Image (cartoon, rainbow, N blue to C red):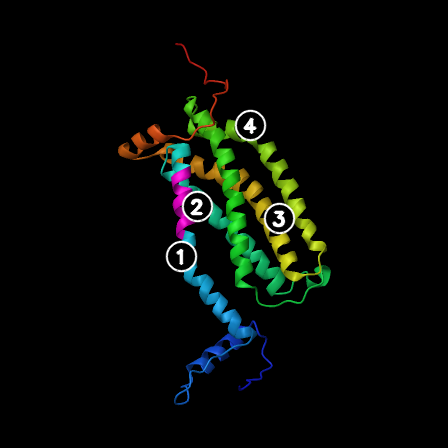
């Protein structure tokens, strides 16, 4: 057994490049050389995660599109939801890099800055994406309901948010506070998960659902509810509804 000693950070890109260089060396005759160690384990883990990531992302996108299409009857709304969720998650992951990799707030939280763990990034992405889609379905359910009552796209958004805004904000605040409690831990990956998930929830409930969602639907106008005629028939046949119809206010009828 041969040991390669280096003063590089085991999670750094330079250390991972060193593992690749060692593995590229030709094996001695009749010997299958293997490379181990913490950095090599990290490289193998990242390769395993990134290899399955396209399948996981495709599964998330496909299920999101199908469920939101059956919920709203529109092919535009699922695409709009994916774009906005991507914006929110990108902001959250950027904040995590700023805090845990660049070292801002390290003195307050008591951790040592280092390159982020890929597995934790993927875990944060999946949990935050699921929670954001939960809020998406909750808000869009009420907006779609108003739309089916005959309100215009803009008015449906206003009334839908008026019915769900306080509930979503309160629920998001409670869940975020629960995750922020992880910050009292002195284990960095628990702090990462708590801060990242709590921040993702707050960003989604305020900036995404409260600002970008209504702005996006207003900019799209009636096109936000578009679907090809064959798919519209599918949506009418398999539409996902809340079960019982509540008595909702109907648009005023102008007589003249």
| Secondary structure found at label 3 | helix
* Magenta-tinted stretch: 58-67
**Which tag, 2 or 1, sits closer to the chain's start?**
1
Please report whichever mark, 2 or 3, sits nearer to the chain's N-terminal start.
Answer: 2
Viewer-closest of 175 and 108: 175
Task: Give the image location of residue 165, x and y in percent.
Answer: 57, 33
Q: Secondary structure at mark 2?
A: helix
Q: Identify the mark nearer the N-term, 4 or 2.
A: 2
Residues under numbered marks 2 and 1 in contact, where contact means CB atoms less than 8 Å apart:
no
| Comes first in the chain, label 4 or label 3 | 4
**Residue at the front extreme, as displayed:** 30
Q: CA distance from mark 4 to mark 2?
A: 23 Å
Outermost residue toward the left in this view: 230
Q: Which mark is residue 163?
A: 4
Magenta segment, prevailing SS (helix, strand or loop): helix
Instruction: Write down the residue under mark 2.
Output: 82
In this view, the mark in front (1 or 3): 1
Tell me the residue that label 1 is attached to: 54
Residue 1 versus residue 59 in the image, above or below: below
Residue linked to disc 3 = 198
On screen, residue 47 above or below 144: below
Q: Nearer the viewer, residue 29 or 165?
A: 29
Q: Which residue is depicted at the point 67% across and 45% down?
A: 177
Q: What SS does tag 1 mark?
A: helix
Using a 10 Å C-alpha cutoff, classify the residue at mark 1 as few (fewer than 14 neighbours), some (14 to 19) or many (20 or more). few
């Amino acid at each position: 057994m041969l040991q390669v000693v280096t003063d590089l950070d085991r999670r750094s890109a330079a250390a991972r490049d060193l593992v690749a260089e060692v593995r590229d060396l030709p094996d001695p005759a009749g010997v299958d050389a293997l490379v181990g160690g913490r950095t090599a384990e990290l490289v193998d883990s990242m390769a395993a995660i990134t290899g399955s990531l396209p399948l996981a992302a495709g599964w998330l996108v496909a299920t999101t599109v199908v469920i939101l299409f059956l919920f709203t009857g529109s092919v535009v709304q699922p695409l709009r939801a994916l774009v906005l969720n991507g914006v929110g998650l990108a902001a959250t992951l950027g904040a995590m890099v700023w805090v845990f990799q660049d070292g801002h707030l390290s003195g307050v939280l008591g951790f040592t800055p280092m390159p982020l763990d890929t597995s934790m990034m993927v875990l944060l992405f999946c949990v935050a994406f699921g929670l954001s889609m939960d809020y998406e379905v909750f808000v869009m359910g009420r907006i779609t309901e108003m739309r089916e009552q005959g309100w215009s796209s803009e008015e449906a958004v206003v009334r839908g948010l008026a019915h769900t805004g306080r509930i979503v904000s309160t629920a998001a605040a409670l869940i975020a506070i629960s995750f922020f409690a992880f910050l009292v831990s002195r284990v960095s990956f628990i702090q990462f998960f708590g801060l990242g998930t709590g921040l993702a929830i707050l960003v989604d409930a305020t900036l995404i659902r409260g600002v970008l969602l209504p702005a996006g639907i207003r900019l799209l106008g009636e096109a936000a509810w578009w679907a090809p005629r064959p798919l519209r028939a599918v949506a009418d046949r398999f539409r996902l509804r809340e079960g019982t119809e509540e008595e909702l206010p109907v648009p005023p009828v102008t007589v003249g």
